[in-house]
């Protein structure tokens, strides 16, 4: 259930923006590497020093979250869970990490298991989380690994804030939701420090705060799924989050065939070209991030049905059709409001 080069173009989403202001020195952009990706924050404040201070605090918040949510950071709760010799033994983790795991399970239930933070063994088998593979896994290998995948096998103790797993071969990864949550927290910090107009981009998980300029929303271009230099559509955003999952973000090629990094937790196989990309717009980036992955796994029909049943959520699913064709599926709230040119 991630994840890019900005203008704001971030892999799948290209964002163009500018501010009309009489004090350009109060508009600052900063870029840092956190959460395994390039993070860009651009903000406009009343003064240079106040704006710079707000951006620094937003980055500090993201770094703090990385220390408790990353599976790679030693002594983080996620690291301790994955590296425990007895995973049936409850491990106490940070309250915030516990809350993200709990919310991840909610998204798993909502999507009938399409979003699943226990997919790590499958990703390792396919070479997306560890040593690259030189050949595709066989059916028996996939079948064995699938026994160690399933959000329903995460055991939470609400009172003690502990987590345990039903199998010693299980692992969890919050990568499909942590970046979205980090974007939301960074936006909250910017707001708390007086910033009313900003963009936070964590490797394609984006929140647009306020406006591009007076009475104008942000313009967000949807990138062609097979041509990174081409836009196929535009949407306008104000105080909204957007996230995209695509089969060209991360992939490998074996024997001439491309395999996406997004693996179906039920079948054990990567999703292939249907969809090619999924873009979700929501009120916060945590929702957009998790749903983009879920819909990618569910596919156009079930994915759009899921989004149509949710308030204040819209989505675009682009799939391969024929040899060189494309199909676009939209949520009801976008029909007639957006066009595409491939």
Image: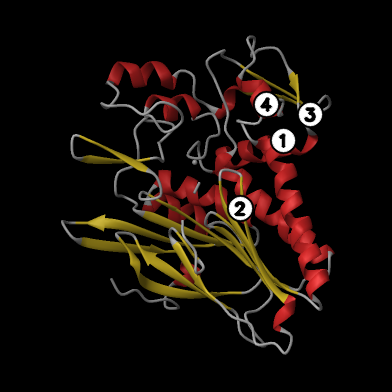
Of all residues, the one furthest to the bottom in this rendering is 22
- For mark 1, what is the residue? 68
- For mark 2, what is the residue? 287
Q: Position of residue 106 (x, y in %)?
A: 63, 40
Q: Position of residue 79 (x, y in %)?
A: 65, 25
Mark 3 vs mark 4: give the one in front: 4
Instruction: Measure the alpha-carbon separation of dots 3 and 4.
Output: 24 Å
For label 2, the crowd category at 10 Å Cα-Cα, with few meaning under 14, some 14 to 19 and many 20 or more, is many
Q: Earlier in the sequence, mark 1 or mark 2?
A: 1
For label 4, the crowd category at 10 Å Cα-Cα, with few meaning under 14, some 14 to 19 and many 20 or more, is few
Residue at figure coordinates x 64%, y 9% from the top left: 86
Q: Earlier in the sequence, mark 1 or mark 4?
A: 1
Instruction: Measure the alpha-carbon separation of dots 3 and 1.
Output: 18 Å
- For mark 4, what is the residue? 74
Mark 1 vs mark 4: give the one in front: 4
Q: Quadrant of the rendered structure where residue 216 is?
A: bottom right
The relative height of residue 76 versus residue 166 in the rendered view (above or below) is below
Q: Is residue 312 visible?
A: no
Instruction: Measure the alpha-carbon separation of dots 3 and 2.
Output: 22 Å
Q: Are marks 1 and 2 in contact (CB under 8 Å)?
A: no
Q: Secondary structure at mark 3?
A: loop
Q: Are marks 1 and 4 in contact (CB under 8 Å)?
A: no
Q: Which mark is residue 158?
A: 3
């Amino acid at each position: 259930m991630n994840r890019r080069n900005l203008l704001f173009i971030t892999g799948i989403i290209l964002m163009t923006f500018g501010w009309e202001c009489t004090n350009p020195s109060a508009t600052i952009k900063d870029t840092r590497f956190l959460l395994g990706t390039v993070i860009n924050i651009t903000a406009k404040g009343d003064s240079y020093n106040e704006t710079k201070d707000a951006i620094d605090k937003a980055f500090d918040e993201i770094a703090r979250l990385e220390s408790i949510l990353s599976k790679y950071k030693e002594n983080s709760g996620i690291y301790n869970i994955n590296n425990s010799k007895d995973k049936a033994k409850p491990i106490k983790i940070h309250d915030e990490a516990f809350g993200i795991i709990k919310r991840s399970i909610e998204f798993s239930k909502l999507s009938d298991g399409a979003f699943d933070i226990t997919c790590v063994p499958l990703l390792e088998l396919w070479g997306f989380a560890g040593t690259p593979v030189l050949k595709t896994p066989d059916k028996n290998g996939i079948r064995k690994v699938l026994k160690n995948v399933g959000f329903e096998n995460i055991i939470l103790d609400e009172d003690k804030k502990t987590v345990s797993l039903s199998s010693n071969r299980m692992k969890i990864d919050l990568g499909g939701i942590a970046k979205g949550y980090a974007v939301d927290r960074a936006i909250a910090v910017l707001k708390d420090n007086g910033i009313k107009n900003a963009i936070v981009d964590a490797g394609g998980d984006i929140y647009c705060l306020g406006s591009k300029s007076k009475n104008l929303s942000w313009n967000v271009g949807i990138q062609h799924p097979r041509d990174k230099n081409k836009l196929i559509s535009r949407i306008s955003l104000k105080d909204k989050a957007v996230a995209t999952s695509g089969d060209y973000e991360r992939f490998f090629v074996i024997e001439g065939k491309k395999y996406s990094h997004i693996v179906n937790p039920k079948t054990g196989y990567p999703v292939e070209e249907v969809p090619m990309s999924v873009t979700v717009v929501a009120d916060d980036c945590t929702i957009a991030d998790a749903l983009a992955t879920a819909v990618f796994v569910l596919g156009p029909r079930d994915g759009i049905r899921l989004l149509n049943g949710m308030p204040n959520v819209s989505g675009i699913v682009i799939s391969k059709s024929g040899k060189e064709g494309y199909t676009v599926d939209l949520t009801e709230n976008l029909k007639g409001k957006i066009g595409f040119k491939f």
